[in-house]
Amino acid sequence: MAKKLKPVDAVLVGMGWTGAIFAKELAEAGLRVVGLERGRMHETIPDWQSPAMHDELKYAVRWGMMVDVSKETLTFRNHSDQTALPMRQLGSFLPGTDVGGAGVHWNGQTYRFLPSDFTLRSHYSKKYGRDFIAPDLTVQDWGVTYPELEPFYDHFERVCGVGGRAGNLKGQRMPGGNPFEGPRSREYPNPPMIQAHAGALFEKAAASLGLHPFPEPSSNMSRAYTNPFGAQLKPCMYCGFCERFGCEHFAKASPQVCVLPLAMRNPNFELRTGAHVNRVLLDASGRRATGVLYVDGQGREFEQPADIVVLCAYGLWNVHLLLVSGIGTPYDPATGQGVVGRNYAYQTTSSVKVFYPPDVNINPFMGAGALGTVIDDFNGDNFDHGPLDFIGGGYIAAHTTGGRPIMYHPVPPGTPRWGSAWKRAVADNYNHVASIDCHGSSMSRRQNYLSLDPTYKDAHGRPLLRLTFDFPENDRRMSRHLTDQAERIAKAMGGRLTDRSDRSDTYSIVPYQTTHNTGGAIMGTDPRTSAVNRYLQSWDVPNLFVQGACAFPQNAGYNPTDTVGALAYWSVKALIERYLKRPGPLVQT
Amino acid sequence: MTRSDLATATPSPTEDAARGPANVGETAAPGYAFLNDQDVAFLRAAVDRLIPADDYPSASQAGVLTYIDGQLAGVYGRGERMYLAPPHRTGTPEQGYQLGLSPAALYRKSLDALASHPLGRDFPSRPGAQQDAFLRELEAGEWMLGDVPSAVFFETLLANVIEGYFADPLYGGNRNMAGWRMVGFPGAYAHYTQWVGQHNVRFNRPPMSIAMRRDAVSRPGPAASDPRIPESARPRTKPRGTR
Ligand SMILES: Cc1cc2nc3c(=O)[nH]c(=O)nc-3n(C[C@H](O)[C@H](O)[C@H](O)COP(=O)(O)OP(=O)(O)OC[C@H]3O[C@@H](n4cnc5c(N)ncnc54)[C@H](O)[C@@H]3O)c2cc1C
């Protein structure tokens, strides 16, 4: 029997980016809040200090900070007619664990989505005709617009201390920034980072082709910075141990550094680590959450009653919790009915490498997670899709990050995979290659979804989440087009040869791509096609709020966290200013 | 060990069996925790074909066997952070590893199968070209090592060899930071703020490992005389910018 604890006003499941945001805001609004985190506490000092943190094997290769899949994983198949099998070790994506979640070991690439991304279906239908969007795509509008979210983007970027250069200030085009972005109300809180060599080579080539390079918006600090809460961040040292690592320098925005200390200082907030939430509890009507059930490190079960439950466990696990708790109708791809698990999407990535002669030193190890030079000319609907046979796009960037030699030792095409010739090629090329990444959008389609697995269980005896996903034909075309553009730039970068790595047509769970899993509990205006309303409040259980990228109806050609953070602030504001005054649905159906 | 066309379906070990042999160490070769004499003989020869000696040491000279042994005897070897629960089915390549064997169990089965076959037993005494030919057969999945498809073993071994050659020396490989010297990776440095904007500079300080003291890093590096580096790219006393 679970031990029943003292009720609180709000319980948060998971203490990463979204959990930390809710902890601070709700506690300041006077609510008694408990944050439950399955992992442990860890912090800049003493946990992430150099040189011990600079251990590629432990953190980047053996996934030292990521979810332990022996306890919790998912099963995967490309199509419904296959049997899904467990992801027995990490690969394609790396969900976090421990306080801070993936917000500790992210890169810090902090992009806004385009205004047209939020009205995707109506935008394309209006501009290119109703039939332009392929019939298998279940893409839809978000129910929230860019102008509505702008203040919340602005706020999250100040919380994170993002460095960049505005390309559009209140509608006015600014030199050196991204000319395609939506209007910003203010300049970035910090200037861009120092440009790396690869970025400079990319910039020159892109500009020579008439494209519009700009510095990547970065949550790695370009200078010392104090955020609106008084949290102090230090300048990035370009140490090159960023993504997959915790930052030793207080130089990468993370929940621990930017938000959590403020929550921890507030007596209204209590953090419990080693607390794995297994289920959201409902009353007999099924329309009200009464709290959550969790187990601690010793396997003891607790019931934490609460008036408000907020899922902040990362998109995938939020959807899992909804499914195992029986909240909302599970999606059925055969009929297209149901909403929980619907519109899972991802990111469609590819790359091109430029090999230089030995007198060009790229120094890939002098990097940072969000050190890059980017073009956005082929993202979203920034280019004419009329003559093309797909929707969406992506950014193309020369990043200088991750140049650690176990995982990064590029060799020219045609090199054997091992032996003397391979070894020589590794030695000759390591310092002389620039990498260009294509970061493409991912459209949801009818056949891709999340559900519960009928066979495999997690360490807590719950059915594993089951992922059914393959790249839509639309995205394969988009990705080929995007990679063509990247190759064009690569060829203009003055190397001795280029090597293009297209994304495989069939999605594989094995190679790392991105930890940008989206959808499954999407936001929208219609409870038949969305799991949560525009404030991320469950349609079915109004005292339940579901955060994270699971709210995205489809994924844009950008990294998700700026939008995840903006949505969290948008959601928590509605909760505090409207829901608390009048508990109940914030949107009437 | 059999040709792979003789393969039968892969079995479903129970989860306990899958975590690997409990008697790690009992039969180990002197100085090793997991690998026995036969394993060491085969692996020494094999890893030195994967990364042979040239101006820089071979895999075994760089300590890669010590590295692999340590990994297999530890958390990684036991697959403690893998989901190994049954049922085990053969999946598509896109579904990834499905054998249900921990890395230690995978090595044990594969190495025992190799030791039971003349091609495996005699491998260390064969000429290099024949060794390469056999490794290519393993790589192509042409053999079953017990019930392990040889390609699965080969890919695991290749990945571990590369890890051992480039991981921090803390783990027993990359001895004297040879792998890092070879490519010019400086290791566990904490900052490059003064360097990152000096495009095309050649960073020529000697590498630093986690266990090294910080004050040991300011000596001029050997890279200055490295014959593999063209004159134009040799280190200069002052960093050179292109801007
Ligand atoms: C290597 C890497 C690089 C990335 N780089 C970028 C980038 O450059 N830009 C970008 O925009 N995004 C990036 N991301 C993604 C980014 O980290 C996520 O979007 C962000 O952290 C999501 O916030 P969240 O609050 O939804 O989840 P998280 O921050 O992951 O937090 C979820 C928390 O919930 C906890 N939890 C889960 N289940 C339970 C449970 N049942 N009970 C209790 N606690 C639970 C987890 O342990 C975790 O602490 C990256 C991710 C990775 C892994």
Image (cartoon, grey):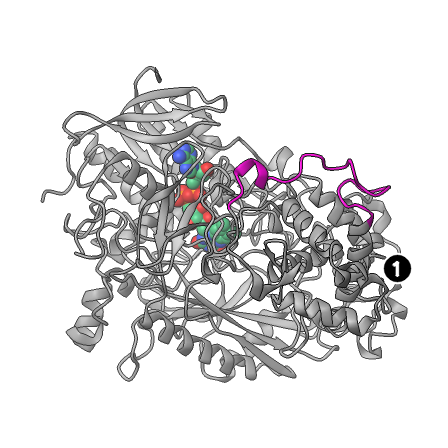
Q: Where ligand 1 lies, by image quadrant? A: top left
Q: Chain of mark 1?
A: B
Residue A178: percent from left, percent from top: 42, 68
In this rendering, the answer to whether B233 lies above or below A21 is: below
In this rendering, the answer to whether A268 lies above or below B186 is: above
Q: Nearer the viewer, residue A94 or A570?
A: A94
In this rendering, the answer to whether A578 lies above or below A249 is: above
Part of the protein shown in magenta: B12-37
**Residue occupying the point 50% across, 55% down:** B9
Residue A392: percent from left, percent from top: 32, 70
B27 magenta-colored: yes
Q: Nearer the viewer, residue A479 or B223?
A: A479
Which residue does the numbered mark 1 point to in the structure image? Answer: B220
Q: Quadrant of residue B156?
A: bottom right
Q: Quadrant of residue A329?
A: top left
Residue B142: percent from left, percent from top: 62, 67
Left/right of residue B109 with respect to residue A298 in the rendered view: right
Kind of residue indicated by mark 1: Pro
Left/right of residue A509 with respect to residue A569 in the rendered view: right
* Residue A24 shows up from this direction: no
